[in-house]
Every structure is written in C-alpha cells, then in structure tokens.
Amino acid sequence: MNDATQVIARCRELARITDVEGETTRTFLSPAMRRANQLVATWMREAGLTTRVDAAGNLRGSRPSPHKNAKTLILASHLDTVPNAGAFDGVLGVMMALAVVDSLQDTALPFHVEVIAFSEEEGVRFGVPFIGSRAIVGSMDDALLAREDLTGTSVRAAIHTYGLDAAQLPDAVVPDALGYLEFHIEQGPALESEGLPLGVVETIAGQSRYEVRFTGVANHAGTTPMPLRHDAMSAAAQWITEVETYARATRGLVATVGSVVTIPGAGNVIAGAVHATLDVRSANDSVRDDAITHLLNFAKSCGDSRGVAVASTQRLAQAAVPMDFDLLTLLEDAVDGTGNVIRRMVSGAGHDAMIVAPYIPAAMLFLRTPRGLSHHPDEAVLPADVQLGLDAGTAFVRLLAARENAR
C-alpha cells in the first residue's frame, strides 16, 4: 500500500465512525469523536509520535527535535464534520500530515513537529466554528465557554463531561511555534477546471454575513391593485437580482442570498415580510466593504419604491487573512519540485488556518476536488493528487529544515 492509498483508506475508515447511523456525522466532543480520536491516536503512535488530548479535545501527536530549545512546526486540520458529510473535508489534512511525518522518521529535523487533529472546526454543535484551533492560539474566552448547544449544555460543561478540564486550556497553546501547514481539499471547482492537482493558498477571503428584512403589508392577492401594494417579496426579488449582477461584475467578489423566508408564505397572499440572508466574500476587504454598502443601500431603494421598510443586522464580519509570505514561497518551491504548475489561490471558505495565521506563520495547500463537491457524501479525491500533495508536503518540511539549519 503506497502512502496515498493508505491516506485515502484511513479517511474512509474514519467516515464509518459516526454519531448518526447511515451517514458520516461527528460533532464536537461527541461519542464518535472520542472513537475517532482513539483510532487516530493508534496510528500516531505507530508513526512514533507521543500522543495526548488537550483541554479542548484536540488530539495531538508530537515528535521532538534533538534540539531541546527548538521551535515547533504544526501540521493540522480537523476531524469533526458537518451533518451527512463526505470522507475528506478536514480528515484528509490530518491523515496527510501524519503520513508526511511518518515518511520523515529517519530524518533529523531542527524543530519539533506536532500533528494536531482539531476537535471542532465546523461550528455544528455550538454554532461557533474553530473551537479546536482557537484553543492552540489562546483565543477561547469566557463567552465562548458559556455558549450553549440545543440541549442547554455549555462548551465548558461539554469539556467537563468529556473528561477534560477547561481550566487547563492555557496548556493547549503552542508556546513557541515556528509555523503551521494545513492540507485541505479545495471544496470548489477551480483546480479541476484548470486541470491542476494542487493550489497554494495566498489568502483566505474575508466574509460579511447579514440578515436583511423587508417589511411591507400582507394583503389579498386578488383584490389589491398593483399600484397599491406594499409587496415585500417584490422588493426582495429585485434586490436579490442586484446581488448577483453586482458580484458578477466585480472581480474577486462572490455574493450569495442563500436563504429566503416569506411571511405569511401563502400563495394567495401578498408577502408582508421577507427575511433573507446575505453572504459577501472577497480577498480584498475594501472590495467587500464597498459591496456591502452598495447592496444594503440598493435594498433600501427597492423598499422605498414600494413603501416597504428595510432593515439589516450584521451576523459576521471577518477580515481577509493572508498566509505568511515566507512559508507560502517555500510551499510554492515544494510544489514546483513535484513538477507541477504553481497556482496561487484565494480560499473562499473559512479554515483553521485563518484562526492560526494572526498568531503563527501559516501556509495552506489545496488539493483538487472532483466536481467541486464538498460537504456531501460523494466528496472525493484523486489518489495521484494525494500523492503529489504528500510529496509537496514532505519537500516543504525538508526545505524548512534546510532554512532553519542555515540560520
């Protein structure tokens, strides 16, 4: 069994560990997450790593450097999933990290290496993502620990129930990190459309999310003349079209209205209210901010022309996060060494690397996603791409070692 075959087989084996029979679903500190950690810990120990679980439930496998005062290179991704997930989102990154470290067992490195399987990235259980990576940079605060799931259990209580102690969270922080590398499927169609197996992430796009509410007057659909209507749905529909038109005309911008709720929602009643979501993303924060200003003003104009009130509430504001230039350059050199075209990319999706990067120099390698399909049971990878990713990852660690030895 070659490295890529083993990585894929392990991902599929982990996909069978689930909290919901018949699908792959693993959430923060659930019984399935405990079983997944136990299995991955076995594989880590077989690769010569020393394992532990920190107070946030992250599984960590460490390989010490001969140099006691060395810094630590982190290779990480997440083991939790969305409901009814595929086998590779997050999990592939953990398995590839483990395979890279295993392949370097006979290579002396001037830094410690830690493989981390994050306990939570998706935000499914508590509605807040990235709990695992927040722990390693020390950004878990009391508000997050007090947040409750649908059963009324807080993050702090969930940690206690799992057998861990939130008071030990400071011990989860990596004290002297050299860098961070994350392997991940692209979760989109760009690499496949260009016939490329790998992409080097240069920036994780900033995100803005809003709830936009159109409030008109519900009335009879048959007896209310068109000029006398205050139709919330017509105002929202005109605005939704502008969201698409504006984003299509703006380079590097994506904008989505992903959810629309009409009230009262009957076929023979003019909509009295519409609640819609707005998701805007760009690697350029000024482009994103300009888009938000335009789209919210346009929504108001759509309402004003119909006597419909418009209000909005911001739900998320996340600045774009660039990857570390030096590590990005090393990763490009590593990809180049595999004989592949270097393709810099913006990640439109959020990843643990965006939480880590403000604290630790970070880099990220994307692998082609067949059909651009992710967060779906049919999510897939190509074995040849996985092998190229492993080759690039191993080369990256060697290049980083050479750089550190030269200092």
Image (cartoon, grey):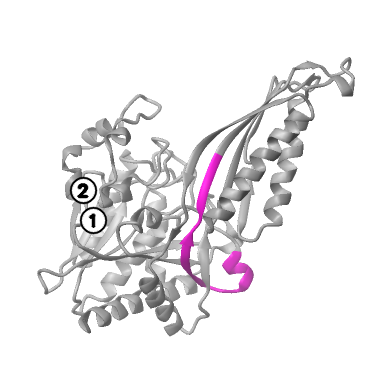
Out of 243 and 56, give the one closest to the viewer.
Answer: 243
Residue 243 place in picture, x, y as percent: 69, 45
Earlier in the chain: of badge 2 and badge 1, it is 2
Relative depth, front residue between 328 and 290: 290
Residue 404 horizontal side relative to residue 68, left or right: right
Could you tell me which residue is drawn at 61 percent across and 49 percent down? 290
Q: Position of residue 367 (x, y in %)?
A: 48, 67
How far apart marks 2 and 1 lie (CA) works out to: 8 Å
Q: Where's the C terminus, which quadrant? A: bottom left
- What percent of the width, then of the height, locates residue 359? 30, 57
Q: Within 10 angstroms of label 2, few (less than 14), some, or many (20 or more) residues?
A: many
Q: Residues within 10 Å of mark 1 (few under 14, many from 20)?
A: many
Tell me where the magenta segment starts and ends, as one range. Answer: 190-209
Amino acid on which disc 2 is placed: Asp
Q: Is residue 132 magenta?
A: no
User: The N terminus lies in which quarter of the figure?
Assistant: bottom left
Describe the element under mark 1 as helix, strand or loop: strand
Figure check: 127 above or below 121: above
Residue found at x 73% / y 35%: 301
Q: Are marks 2 and 1 in contact (CB under 8 Å)?
A: yes
Residue 150 placement: quadrant = top left
Q: Which mark is residue 54?
A: 2
